Image: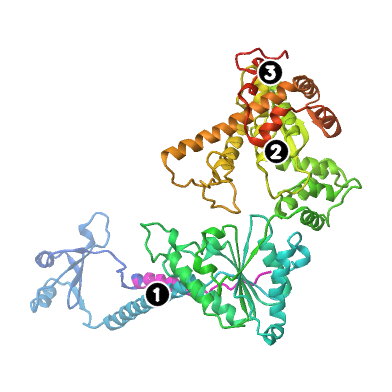
């Protein structure tokens, strides 16, 4: 478990609660002692003299600053004692004489009677409140200062020796990256070996690659193998709304690492912190929080002494946005690519994740690895788990190959939705559409092998699908193979045109993919004979998908020629798909009828039918040259105005 260093927080809330309670009690006691016990009414001094002379006053208490007198009760209906007060006239020496004449009982109180004690108590109480208020304000200021320092502290999680249970044995499929990183571990454990030959370990190691390939897992393995303190933090944890906090956290992180050297500092998602300072835009300030934090990181990395024993490890899937100063030799001077695994790598990953899974005898992990090209380590781990969940759902004690096949389809095409009922017209349209994909794809070079076609709805919007799985890992695509892929994508729409004489919205996703591939064919791969080997797109995202590359600035004429070339590629592929389906129209109808009855066609049954599909010279010529002779485009029966086939 990581060791967290939480900042100590003051003041002590219990002490201030006690202070508030004592203050409240003092206020209550003070009010009880100083508040008069009886109510009195203030009268004028002349009124008081009139009452005395009319023999209505019974008793008088004379104080230096006031007179308190009581009237005789017979003057009131409720016989209650009435107490009145008045302020005496200064130096009225006649008052005692008047009181004796009218037989009024009177007394006097000393000028300092009780005033010293109550005055002292009052002064003490206010001094107490003043001291407590001052202490509270001082404590709050100290708390604010402490909080400011705490905000500037790094939130890195520290893994001590033996606290990480992940090792290199738990990482598979990235053997080259493991070899490079094991050298880092060996340096930390045997520094003398490298110092003897004058070797210096890289100050920074950057792991780059697509999401899910195991970059963070490799960092955990280093923490488990190195046996040294391992500081782990995300790049986004440095940036705050307060200016200077990020730089302070960088300083604190490296100070703590240096104190515990040899140590490893790992920053995940480095692109959140290390974006290029040139990408801020013309209206962005040059001294913002992110730039200050990056500058501090650059200074810390460049300030390391040789063989200091602190190694910076970072991971990102967007290396193209990192600041060039961060990638220069002397900082992140070693870049390790953690790419998607090949077939042998996928097999090793499947074996690691299947250790604790009960597998049936028919499970062939080698075959499964061959059927999952492009899957990253996280995808394969998810595949194993989904298969185990399917087996448990069906009350099986072991995971079968059928579970793996179903899990693969769920990941690639989505969840099966048999509750989505299609009407007869929709079913026929989907069936001919998918068979059209399958026939064209079977004849195209370089396309993935057709494994299954289905008209059972899956995922969000797929009413049917054609599952194609590659036979091997491919790293290059030849131009005729790209043309064949475009024709395969348009095979479904071509079948709808051929059979129904009209098209549906079901081909919208195919058209989108075909258009994108044709654009790359022309603007990125430079395969257009008319435009030549010129790249009109700027490749920006190396490891993240889902984002289009912006086009370079070109003239209006060139832009029009690009659009014409893209349209020519699409039109040619569309015509070829229709030609293939016309030549194999009987097979198209027969396969569609079987699919309508069974809903699913796969394996040997599907391949035995597709093996009857035939190509011709026109298709072969188009694949080789990208050109179709004008007299070879369409037969009358294939035109939009022609008759459709009998269904």
Determine if the magenta segment contains residue 12: yes
Q: In this orientation, does residue 641 appear?
A: yes
Residue at image x 74%, y 51%?
380
Q: Quadrant of residue 467?
A: top right
> Is residue 169 rendered to the left or right of residue 207?
right
Q: Quadrant of residue 575?
A: top right
- Mark 3 or mark 1, which is nearer to you? 3
The residue carrying pointer 1 sits among few (fewer than 14), some (14 to 19) or many (20 or more) residues within 10 Å by Cα, namely: few
Q: CA distance from mark 1 to mark 2?
A: 60 Å
Rendered view: 223 above or below 538: below
Image location of residue 497, percent across then percent down: 64, 20
Q: Residue furthest right?
A: 361
Work out whether mark 1 precedes mark 2 in sequence or the reverse, and give the earlier one: 1
Q: In which quadrant of the rendered image does the N terminus lie?
A: bottom right
Image location of residue 239, percent across then percent down: 48, 64
Rendered view: 300 above or below 167: below
| Disc marking residue 141 | 1
- Mark 2 or mark 3, which is nearer to you? 3
Work out whether mark 3 precedes mark 1 in sequence or the reverse, and give the earlier one: 1
Q: In this orientation, does residue 9 appear?
A: no
Nearer to us in this view, 178 or 150: 178
Q: CA distance from mark 3 to mark 1?
A: 82 Å
Image location of residue 414, percent across then percent down: 69, 38
Q: Which residues are magenta?
A: 1-30
Q: Which residue is mark 3?
A: 499
Q: In which quadrant of the rendered image does the C terminus lie?
A: top right
Q: Which residue is mark 2?
A: 413
- Mark 1 or mark 2, which is nearer to you? 2
């Amino acid at each position: 478990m990581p060791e967290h260093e939480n900042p100590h927080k003051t003041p002590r809330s219990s002490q201030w609660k006690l202070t508030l309670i004592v203050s409240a009690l003092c206020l209550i006691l003070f009010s009880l002692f100083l508040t008069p016990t009886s109510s009195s009414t203030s009268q004028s001094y002349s009124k008081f003299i009139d009452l005395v002379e009319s023999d209505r006053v019974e008793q008088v208490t004379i104080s230096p600053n006031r007179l308190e007198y009581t009237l005789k009760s017979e003057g009131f209906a409720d016989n209650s004692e009435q107490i009145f007060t008045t302020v005496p006239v200064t130096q009225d020496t006649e008052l005692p004489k008047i009181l004796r004449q009218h037989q009024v009982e009177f007394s006097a109180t000393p000028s300092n009677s009780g005033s010293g004690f109550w005055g002292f108590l009052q002064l003490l109480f206010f001094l107490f409140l003043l001291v407590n208020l001052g202490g509270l304000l001082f404590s709050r200021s100290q708390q604010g200062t402490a909080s400011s320092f705490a905000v500037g502290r790094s939130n890195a999680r520290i893994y001590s020796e033996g606290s990480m249970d992940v090792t290199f044995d738990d990482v598979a499929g990235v053997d080259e990256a493991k070899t490079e990183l094991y050298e880092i571990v060996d340096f930390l454990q045997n520094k003398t070996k490298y110092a003897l030959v004058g070797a210096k370990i890289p100050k920074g190691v950057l792991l780059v690659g697509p999401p899910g390939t195991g970059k963070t897992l490799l960092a955990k393995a280093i923490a488990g193998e190195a046996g040294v303190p391992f500081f782990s933090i995300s790049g986004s944890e440095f940036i705050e709304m307060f200016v200077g906090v990020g730089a302070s956290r960088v300083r604190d992180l490296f100070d703590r690492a240096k104190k515990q050297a040899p140590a490893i500092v790992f920053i995940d998602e480095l692109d959140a912190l290390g974006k290029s300072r040139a990408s801020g835009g013309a209206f962005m300030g040059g001294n913002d929080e992110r730039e200050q934090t990056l500058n501090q990181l650059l200074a810390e990395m460049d300030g390391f002494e040789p063989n200091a024993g602190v190694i910076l490890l970072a991971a990102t899937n967007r290396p193209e946005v990192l600041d060039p100063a961060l990638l220069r030799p002397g900082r992140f001077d070693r870049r390790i690519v953690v790419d998607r695994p090949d077939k042998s790598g996928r097999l090793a990953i499947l074996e690691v994740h299947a250790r604790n899974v009960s597998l049936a005898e028919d499970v062939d992990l080698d075959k499964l690895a061959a059927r999952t090209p492009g899957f990253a380590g996280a995808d394969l781990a998810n595949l194993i788990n989904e298969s185990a969940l399917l087996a448990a759902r069906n009350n099986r004690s072991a995971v079968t190959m059928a579970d793996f096949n179903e899990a693969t389809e769920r990941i690639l095409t989505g969840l099966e939705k048999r509750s989505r009922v299609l009407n007869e017209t929709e079913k026929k349209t989907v069936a001919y559409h998918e068979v059209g994909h399958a026939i064209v794809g079977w004849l195209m070079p370089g396309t993935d092998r057709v494994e299954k076609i289905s008209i059972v709805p899956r995922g969000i919007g797929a009413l049917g699908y054609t599952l194609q799985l590659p036979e091997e890992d491919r790293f290059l695509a030849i131009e005729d193979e790209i043309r064949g892929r475009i024709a395969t994508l348009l095979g479904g729409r071509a079948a709808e045109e051929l059979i129904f004489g009209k098209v549906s919205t079901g081909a919208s996703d195919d058209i989108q993919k075909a258009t994108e591939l044709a654009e790359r064919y022309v603007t990125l791969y430079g395969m257009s004979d008319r435009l030549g080997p010129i790249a009109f797109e700027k490749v920006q995202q190396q490891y993240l998908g889902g984002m289009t590359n912006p086009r370079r600035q070109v003239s209006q004429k060139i832009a029009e020629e690009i659009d014409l070339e893209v349209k020519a590629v699409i039109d040619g592929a569309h015509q070829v798909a229709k030609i293939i389906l016309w030549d194999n129209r009987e097979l198209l109808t027969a396969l569609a009828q079987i699919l309508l009855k069974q809903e699913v066609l796969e394996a040997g049954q599907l391949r035995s039918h597709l093996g009857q599909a035939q190509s011709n010279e026109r298709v072969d010529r188009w694949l080789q040259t990208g050109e179709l002779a004008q007299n070879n485009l369409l037969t009358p029966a294939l035109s939009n105005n022609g008759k459709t086939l009998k269904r």
